[in-house]
Amino acid sequence: MTTLAPPPAPAAPEGRHRAVTRPGSRLGRLFTGAPDDPRWARPALWAVLVLATALYAWNITSLTGNSFYDAAVYSGTRSWKAFFFGALDAGSFITVDKPPFALWVMGLSARVFGYGNWQLALPMVAVGTGSVALLYRMVKRDFGAAAGVIAALVLTLTPITVAIDRDTNPDPVLVFLMLLGAAALMRAVRTGRLLPLVWSGIAIGFAFNTKMMQAYLVLPVFLLVYLWAARLPLGRRVRNLAVATVALLVSSAWWMVVVDLIPASSRPYIGGSTDNTVWDLVIGYNGFGRILGASSSVGSQGNGASFGGSSGLYRMFNEIMGGQISWLIPFAVIALVGGLVLCGRAPRTDARRAGLLLWGGWFVLHYLTFALAEGTFHPYYVTAMAPGIAALAGAGGVLLHRALREGSAVRWAWVLPLAVAATTLWAVVLLRRVSGEGTGYTVAAVVAGVAGTAAVAGLLAGRLLGRRRLLGVAAVAAVVALLAGPTAYSLSAATTTSANGTNPTAGPSTGGGMGGGQRPGGAESDGRSARQPPAGGGPGGTESDEGAQAGAGAAAAAGGLGGGGDTQVSSGMVTYLKKHQDGATWLAAVATDQTAAQLILESGQPVISMGGWSGSDEAMTLAKLKSLVAAGKLHYLVISGGGQGTGSEIATWVKKHSTAVSAYSGLYRLDASAVG
């Protein structure tokens, strides 16, 4: 078995290396790198970070995110109570269906800079670029500067990552926190100290308060890597893990415990839950419901709707998902296996093997979870898998290149060329799927094919002839070949003028229906509208009764509290509601979150979502409705025919005791006298 020795210690400066200008100058190291870094390393990193920032922030003032979360952020700027709970509306009637940490991040930006497109996008751009920098640092530490730069570049150009980092979904914050947890874990593995492991647990706890159970996908591999590779006796490893688990649980559960301990009458309804508790949201809608697609109390409302194609091991390669994430999966798999073999019989605490186990486990666990999930699945979820693929591409690629160059075994002459050839072939297949969608994709296919062929030939010839310079040139050609396709898709995502904020994807349309595959800027798959800044009443703004933007509120109100209907919430209706709000806390009550969010953003006023996202939440009861009307806190409801259960009961009562507003179909006025 071939085992590579650890990289040799750097020699004194001889052209390839140089010392920093002043020993101990952290500012100098920020721009020039550490003394043992190659001359090109820090400039290359800065170039990648500039590229990432440009892709994620291009035309930032026009970025439109997910209106559902945008409305909650706006509401949080109007009310600290809504801010804490993550309420959809400033009146704190119902929360969004996720914990609020990402909303807090965007909300603080909006409170400091004012509410608007770039203010909400700025934190996402920052954490997206921060994830690239953090991945570089982690991979470089164990595998060298070249591996770090490649990993950072691959993550930067992952198409779905570009798309989601330009959005206001919580996933960019989730990925950054998970990487922080991984960085702290590896520090604990290398040093044997307890504190970094505790910080790792805390980081994952904050990630849990960003997107709940998805944050825990990396915990099994964190546990195994620490138990295997930490520089401590087994007893101390187990003890440290126990302490870190306490930190994890406390940082994960504190918000949930606080919210569930507050009486339901004093807080918003927990959107997406079946019993108005955060715990049910954790194990149901945002837990087993995503995996099992169940509708029971265990699965909650994970109803199986999938925007990424049918579940199965091939899902990441289908026409919807392939162009978003799969480009370098063949290379990552070969690099992982080859890298682990190359580590051979290294000591238990070998940092390179620990790194490969971390990133390999990260990739495999995410792949299996996302591929086999039968619940609601959006393509942008897989951005959490991208760091694993990127790290394996950088670390494994460098190990395979070193084995090709220095290894004595004949078999290593074929592994890297095989990985490049297989991945290039897959890239060409993906690009041929969209060959009619623009010349950029055709050019990318040609570049990938030509560069890939040159890379494979150069790697084999360089090994056969013993030409190290040729091997270096071939390695550069391989990088070009493997990133040509992702670059074309990423540029598409970065330059689109009107992205799909709810279900963002990169590149052209390659699928349809519930499978998603939207061309960025196309019609939204599930009915949410692109963000419109509030017409008035926002931080630093002035409220205007006539401020409704024409055409911005065309979302359909559902039948009853969740069925299909044809009632339209128009801008004219919004203007009418604002003129006749008569001091009520809420502008109106509507069937679902989608309609409520658009009304909030258009009017700048609180709006009640009676049925949550799907219309099936029992957030509004007839008794609660009567109480709000009697107190003068609510005058108007928007309802339509149909509906079942509570929705039908409320609709029947409203139609019997209210006054229909004849100018707007489905709009009803209720006054305190109706309750008596």
Image (cartoon, rainbow, N blue to C red):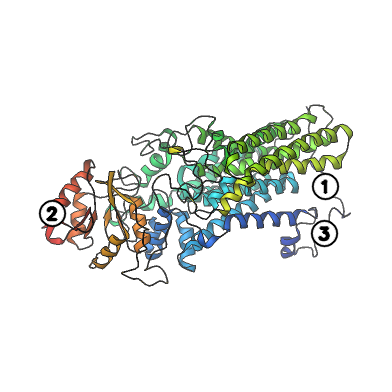
Q: Work out which quarter of the rendered image holds the C terminus and state it.
A: bottom left
Helix, strand or loop at mark 2: helix
Q: Which residue is mark 3?
A: 19
Q: Which residue is more in the foreground, 614 or 210? A: 614
Give the vertical position of 224 relative to 145 (above or below). Answer: above
Contact check, label 2 and label 1, Cβ < 8 Å: no
Tell me how far mark 2 sits from mark 3, CA to CA. 81 Å
Q: Earlier in the sequence, mark 2 or mark 3?
A: 3
> Is residue 126 visible in this depiction of the protein?
no
The kind of residue on which mark 3 rests is Ala
Left or right of 548 on screen, residue 174: right
The kind of residue on which mark 2 rests is His
Q: Dot 1: few (<14), some (14–19), or many (≥20) neighbours within 10 Å?
A: few
Label at residue 9 = 1
Q: Nearer the viewer, mark 3 or mark 1?
A: 3
Q: Nearer the viewer, mark 2 or mark 1?
A: 2
Left or right of 32 on screen, residue 508: left
Q: Earlier in the sequence, mark 3 or mark 1?
A: 1
User: Residue at the location (43% across, 38% down)?
Assistant: 514
User: Residue at the location (24% across, 68% down)?
Assistant: 583
Q: Which residue is mark 2?
A: 657
| Residue 305, image x, y percentages | 41, 37
